[in-house]
Amino acid sequence: MGLIDYGAGNLVSVAQGLEIAGAAVRPVRRAGDLAGLELVVVPGVGAAAPAMARLEEAGLVEPLQAWLVEDRPFLGICLGLQLLFEGSDEDDAIMLGAIPGRVRLLTGGRRLPHIGWNQVERRRGHPAFAGIPNGADFYFVHSYAGRPEHPYTDDVVLGETTDGGRFVSAIARSRLLGVQFHPERSGPHGLRFLRNVVGLVRDDRFPREIPSPAVEVVA
Amino acid sequence: MLLRRVIPCLDVANGRVVKGTRFVDLVDAGDPAELAERYAREGADEIVFLDISAAPEGRGPLLDVVRRTAQRVFIPLTVGGGVRSEDEMGAVLRAGADKVSLNTAAVADPSLIARCAARFGRQAVVVAIDARRKLGQPAWEVLVRGGRDAVGLDAIAWAQRAADLGAGELLVTSIDRDGTQSGFDLGLLRAIASRVPVPVIASGGAGEPADFISAISEGGADAVLAASIFHRQQHSIDDVKAAMAGAGIPVRVAPRAA
């Protein structure tokens, strides 16, 4: 399993978490490193534009986009989730564009960054959260969050979290997973999540949802 | 809902956890990695790890201790003590820390905060402020080098500046209360928490579970840090959190290891 090494601060803790979860992890620094991988994990804390610039420098933007188009197993963590959207209000960054929507500053909370433990309320079942109670606490540290363009019709939203306002804290679409929290720093629940993901990849047990028709749902 | 955090602090000198009173009279309190693991198991929301011997002796941080701790502890780890540059901060993060706390070096060169925030993100930059009340005034001055030297800097103004420059959190320690177990300096906490937009971690003076409650409800803190109350096993993290929950403060009940 490959961990994108583009200078993100939490690389080590994500690698350790994945190893505890049973994965053999190797760093991905250039496109050639993607060959033969079962799962790509994009970790990340920090700002959107420098992260995209570093992916660009490493020649990884197009290979990652191809990986996502081919629906190969992918896990984005924190900034790694945000990078999946089309763009971000943070630095007006242009991102990978795998999920329609935009990353926006959190609003309504007590303070920014949103740092600490908060609950992930699941909107549907998913094997990545097997054995983890709905509403379990996970560790967050971020100021922005992705807002899918059609959250109620495109089946991408898996979990939501409230800090003043509500934001999307977990997404899943076929073999693509993204979480705004840090599973590698979320204690036993976080390690369970990583073990679940590693198991899904190993046995290719991802639920393959058929995208629902674009019917407008009045919220 | 975002939960209020309880954070045990491990002051480390020469690779051992130590605890003193008002930053002096240090006594040995154990191995850092072992103690961090125990606290994580007991429900700590985060671990802060300060190498208090680093800055005064001009040494780099003890990366191997950071590495050993980070491998065993799957909750956030903040490391401070003697970090003077972006490169040193990068080395601490690569050793497994999630956040780095800057103190003496940031006071000497405030642009360090902005440079570290630009490179690693502001959420990775904690600015630690050691403050001492000015006699007879509602004002506090900043001390550096492990609480040794005053530098003529107002703590509230410095807190605001640090947040403006890119600190993602402020760790505010009352030197007057540190290790005394006589309660937090609520005036200091209130003065800073009401003026900065970033989370404030209260430190210095925890003696009773009630002190954690007042740091949050009266001091306006987002997280509470303590050392000796936990090291001396006077109160467990569970006791403290139960008292906080009883006072209506949202806290995390840690799951048993899966």
Image (cartoon, helix red, strand yellow):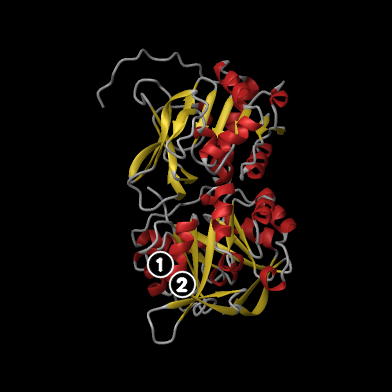
Name the quadrant containing residue B244. Answer: bottom left
Quarter of the picture holding the C terminus of chain B:
top right
Q: Quadrant of residue A3?
A: top right
Read off the residue under disc 2: B155
Tag 2: amino acid: Ala
Task: Please report, as a chain letter, where disc 2 is located.
Answer: B
Residue A48 image position (x, y, % from top left)? 52, 38
Total labels drawn? 2
Q: Is residue A110 left or right of residue B21?
A: left
Report if the CB atoms under discs 1 and 2 are less than 8 Å apart: yes
Q: Is residue B178 visible?
A: yes
Task: Pick the residue in front: B142 or B225.
Answer: B142
Q: Is residue B104 left or right of residue A100?
A: right
Q: Picture coordinates of residue A89 (x, y %)?
A: 42, 37
> Which is more N-terminal, label 2 or label 1?
2
Element at label 2: helix
The residue wearing badge 1 is B192
Between the C-alphas of marks 1 and 2, the distance is 8 Å
Task: Tell me the element at label 1.
Answer: helix
Q: As shown in the figure, which amino acid type bears the numbered disc 1?
A: Ile
> Quick one: label 1, few (<14), some, or many (20+) residues within 10 Å?
many
Q: Does residue B40 sit above or below A90 in this rendering?
A: below
